């Protein structure tokens, strides 16, 4: 059988090109609106490129354990990084790169007005104005767990539980909370800040003491190449730290 | 084992098959016997869910279900309930996804009934409704049954759209497929394993049923 030239051309372009080192980077979904900025600055500064893949940390932890070809893993939960180290997949225990915060958000059209102490959420719940409230799934999403802890701390968990819609990850929870489908939600502060800038979204930062700290740890895998190593160092540099801080992450001591 | 998710999936599959039964029969019959302008386009539109990723439908449903969408407002005005994050919303999504699974086998079944048979029935003085119930339906029945079983089984397996528009509410929109995904994410391999095995068994039985009914038709003709 003769292949038409077009098919041959397509097959050729699909082949891996040379030995360019473009590592796959697995990143927690709360970094979706932050990391691309750092990655493009990295490419500008060094000429090297990285491929960013966003998803839930738990899913990545599982995929990497099964041999997924990620060279660097930026987790939203340090437990997953420790587990990968214990299983011999990670090069070391990694470093803390940011501490996440959570915020209560709502669309401007919503009757729910976000306030840090969640007092308005309490009264809106009592008044029956909250039909749906979005958080990430606490079973496996770190930001969902933090949201549950904050709601429990405020004594609202039982009242809000029947109203919950669960995002598969914090990005989906943010989408539910701000698209008008739900009256509001608790999402990452990073998403709240970014969304407030581009859409009609209000937010209030929830006190850090109301939930266990979201200690975000990143780690290189044993198969990591030079570009992944360079990006790992770049993420600990002043520029990356400044970008993360601007997007609402607290910074661990250098 | 998340029984409420399992029951919800069965309920969703049941409603989908029940509602798509008459829709599939009418549409399949019309497409089989009538030729009209734009038929190719209609058939192509109906086949779209076979090739489109669930995310495309999920995206459009998110827009359609949004609080400010005219469709959602109309639905709320009509029923007093929202569609987003509700079981009804899932049923609507499921109906759209399963259109080709219901209509195509039924269309094939009606196409297989020769015009001679229908003409003979009409010559004998049977009224159209009687021809439909006494001649066409019995002849097309294996195709209809296999379409319904396929629709039912396919709904049990629907995942992408539910994940995108469902909101994972226990007893309302958390289906078995989403529950399995959650268990896997939460490293509960035992829970995921039990539910997966159950779904595997049900799906296998459903496909065997489809094969049995279509095999029966082949032998009869």
Image: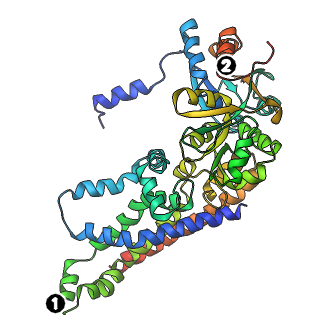
Count residues near mark 1 (Cα–Cα under 10 Å), then give few for <14, some for 14-19, many for 20+. Answer: few
Q: Mark 1 lies on which chain?
A: B
- For label 1, the residue is B123
Residue B35, compared with residue A188, is above or below; it is below
Residue drawn at point x = 68 percent, y = 23 percent? A248
Residue drawn at point x = 29 percent, y = 83 percent? B132
- For label 2, the residue is A244
Residue drawn at point x = 22 percent, y = 88 percent? B121
Residue B153, visible in the rendered structure: yes
- Residue B70 point in image, percent of width and height: 41, 51
- Residue B98 point in image, percent of width and height: 44, 60
In the shown orientation, is residue B82 left or right of residue A150?
A: left
Residue A103, compared with residue B165, is above or below; it is above
Is the C terminus of chain A in the top left, top right, bottom left or bottom right quadrant?
top right
Q: Mark 2 lies on which chain?
A: A
Is the N terminus of chain A in the top left, top right, bottom left or bottom right quadrant?
top left
Tell if the residue under mark 1 belongs to the same chain as the one under mark 2: no
- Residue B112 point in image, percent of width and height: 28, 73
């Amino acid at each position: 059988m003769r292949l038409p030239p077009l098919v041959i051309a397509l097959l050729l372009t699909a082949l891996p090109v040379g030995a360019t080192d473009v590592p796959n980077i697995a990143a927690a979904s709360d970094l979706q609106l932050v990391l691309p900025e750092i990655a493009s600055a990295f490419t500008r500064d060094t000429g090297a490129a990285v491929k960013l893949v966003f998803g839930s940390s738990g899913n990545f932890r599982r995929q990497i354990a099964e041999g997924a070809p990620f060279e660097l893993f930026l987790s939203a939960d340090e437990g997953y990084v420790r587990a990968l180290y214990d299983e011999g997949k990670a090069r070391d225990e990694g470093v803390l790169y940011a501490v996440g915060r959570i915020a209560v958000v709502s669309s401007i059209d919503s009757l729910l007005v976000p306030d840090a102490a969640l007092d308005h959420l309490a009264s809106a719940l009592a008044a029956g104005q909250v039909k749906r409230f979005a958080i990430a799934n606490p079973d496996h999403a770190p930001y969902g767990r933090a949201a549950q802890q904050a709601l429990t701390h405020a004594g609202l968990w039982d009242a809000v539980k029947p109203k919950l819609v669960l995002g598969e990850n914090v990005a989906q929870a943010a989408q539910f909370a701000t698209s008008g489908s739900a009256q509001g939600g608790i999402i990452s502060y990073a998403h709240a800040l970014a969304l407030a800038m581009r859409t009609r979204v209000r937010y209030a930062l929830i006190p850090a003491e109301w939930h266990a700290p979201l200690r975000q740890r990143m780690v290189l895998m044993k198969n990591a190449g030079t570009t992944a190593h360079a990006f790992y160092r770049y993420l600990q540099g002043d520029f990356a730290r400044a970008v993360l801080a601007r997007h609402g992450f607290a910074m661990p001591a250098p | 084992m998340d029984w409420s998710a399992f029951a919800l999936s069965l309920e969703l599959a049941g409603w989908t098959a029940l509602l798509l039964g008459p829709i599939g029969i009418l549409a399949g019959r019309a497409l089989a016997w009538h030729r009209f302008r734009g038929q190719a386009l209609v058939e192509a539109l109906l086949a779209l869910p076979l090739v489109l990723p669930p995310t495309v439908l999920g995206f459009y449903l998110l827009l359609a279900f949004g609080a400010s969408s005219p469709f959602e407002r109309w639905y709320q005005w009509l029923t007093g309930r929202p569609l987003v994050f509700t079981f009804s919303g899932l049923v609507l999504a499921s109906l759209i996804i399963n259109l080709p699974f219901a209509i195509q086998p039924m269309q094939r079944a009606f196409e297989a009934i020769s015009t001679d048979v229908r003409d003979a029935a009409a010559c004998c003085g049977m009224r159209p409704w009687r021809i439909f119930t006494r001649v066409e339906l019995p002849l097309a029945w294996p195709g209809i049954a296999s379409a319904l079983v396929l629709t039912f089984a396919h709904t049990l397996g629907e995942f992408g759209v539910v994940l995108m528009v469902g909101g994972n509410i226990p007893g309302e929109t958390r289906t078995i497929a989403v529950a399995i995904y959650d268990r896997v994410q939460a490293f509960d391999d035992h829970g995921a394993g039990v539910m997966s095995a159950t779904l595997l068994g049900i799906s296998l039985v459903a496909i065997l049923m489809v094969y049995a009914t279509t095999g029966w038709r082949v032998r009869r003709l």
